[in-house]
Amino acid sequence: MASNNLEKEQIFGLAEKEMEYRVELFNKLTQTCFSKCMESRYKESELNMGENSCIDRCVSKYWQVTNLVGQLLGANKPSL
């Protein structure tokens, strides 16, 4: 019974870490793409075509790099 509770705690701990990682990743992506694609002074309430395109490219590249880094780190992970 104690072993089962320990497993549940470990699973919840891992899930919490995963959620923290995803929130941090989203926040970094948002900050990076916002600073690259948005002007410091807002002229319109809606995104214009250039801003939309920039954000699409930025997010796409960010995810590609994140996935590549994850694959490279996973490939170098020692097997248990």
Image (cartoon, helix red, strand yellow):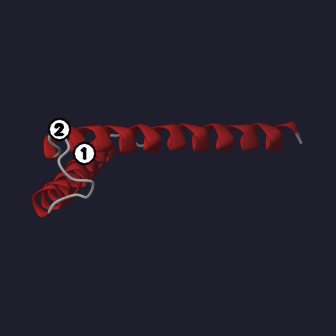
Q: Which of 58 and 68 is in front in this view?
A: 58
On the picture, is 17 further left or further right than 51?
right
Secondary structure under tag 1 reads helix
Q: In which quarter of the image is residue 2?
A: top right
Q: Residue 30 carries which label?
A: none
Say if 72 sits above or below 55 in the image.
above
Mark 1 neighbour density, 10 Å: few (under 14) some (14–19) many (20 or more): few
Q: Is residue 78 among the parts visible in the rendering? A: no
Q: How far apart are marks 2 and 1 (CA)?
A: 39 Å
Q: Nearer the viewer, residue 28 or 79?
A: 28
Residue at coordinates 22% horizontally, 45% vertically from top-left?
A: 33
Secondary structure under tag 2 reads loop
| Amino acid type shown at disc 1 | Leu
Give coordinates of residue 4: x percent, y percent: 81, 44
Q: Which of 75 and 9 is in front in this view?
A: 9
Say if 67 sits above or below 6 in the image.
below
Dot in front, 2 or 1: 2
Residue at coordinates 27% horizontally, 52% vertically from top-left?
A: 67
Say if 76 sits above or below 67 in the image.
above
Q: In which quarter of the image is residue 13?
A: top right
| Amino acid type shown at disc 2 | Arg
Give coordinates of residue 10: x percent, y percent: 67, 38
Instruction: Count all numbered tags in the image, as a single digit.
Output: 2
Q: Mark 2 points at which residue?
A: 41
Q: Name the residue under label 1.
A: 72
Residue at coordinates 74% horizontally, 44% vertically from top-left?
A: 8
